[in-house]
């Protein structure tokens, strides 16, 4: 299973919890707490134990936490920069 995870890492962009929280304009603690309280589905973890957030995970968290406008604002900014 670790081999599959490493292949997926090469094919996708992943973000740390701090980066994902920044996209949603939240404190990292708030996002971590939402994962622990099962308000947000936990993304897969890296071999070192850190969460690996991709765009789909961040979008799902945005919906769950009422932060979808912040996510869309970030997405528009990223797409505008190429």
Image (cartoon, helix red, strand yellow):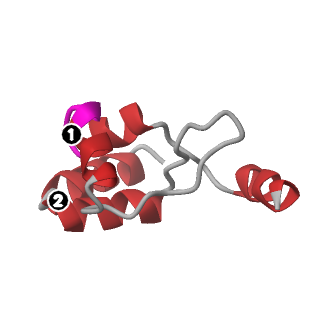
Q: CA distance from mark 2 to mark 1?
A: 10 Å
The answer to whether residue 11 is above or below residue 26 is below
Answer whether residue 23 is visible to the viewer in this image. Answer: no
Circle 2 packing at 10 Å, graded few (<14), some (14-19), many (20+), is some
Circle 1 packing at 10 Å, graded few (<14), some (14-19), many (20+), is few
Taking the spot 26% from the left edge, 44% from the top edge, the residue there is 33
Residue 30, which numbered label?
A: 1
Of 55 and 1, nearer the camera is 1
Q: Secondary structure at mark 2?
A: helix
The quarter of the displayed image where residue 23 is located = top left
Q: Secondary structure at mark 1?
A: helix
Q: Position of residue 10 (x, y in %)?
A: 77, 50
Along the polypeptide, which appears first: circle 2 or circle 1? 1
Q: Position of residue 62 (x, y in %)?
A: 24, 60
The answer to whether residue 23 is above or below residue 2 is above
Taking the spot 25% from the left edge, 51% from the top edge, the residue there is 34
Of 7 and 45, nearer the camera is 45
Q: Quadrant of the N terminus?
A: bottom right
- Would residue 77 appear left or right of 73 to someone viewing this image? right
The answer to whether residue 57 is above or below residue 28 is below
The quarter of the displayed image where residue 72 is located = bottom left
Q: Residue furthest front?
A: 37
Answer whether residue 34 is visible to the viewer in this image. Answer: yes
Taking the spot 60% from the left edge, 38% from the top edge, the residue there is 49
| Label pair 2/1, CB-CB below 8 angstroms | yes
- Would residue 7 appear left or right of 65 to someone viewing this image? right
| Magenta highlight range | 23-29
Residue 25 part of the magenta segment: yes
Residue 20 part of the magenta segment: no
| Residue position for label 2 | 65
Taking the spot 74% from the left edge, 59% from the top edge, the residue there is 8
């Amino acid at each position: 299973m670790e081999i599959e995870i490493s292949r997926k890492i090469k094919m996708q962009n992943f973000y740390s919890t701090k980066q994902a929280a920044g996209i949603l304009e939240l404190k990292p603690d708030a996002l971590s707490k939402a994962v622990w309280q099962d308000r947000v589905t936990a993304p897969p973890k890296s071999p070192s134990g850190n969460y690996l957030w991709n765009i789909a995970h961040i979008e799902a968290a945005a919906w769950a936490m009422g932060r979808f406008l912040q996510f869309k604002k970030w997405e528009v900014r990223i797409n505008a920069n190429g």
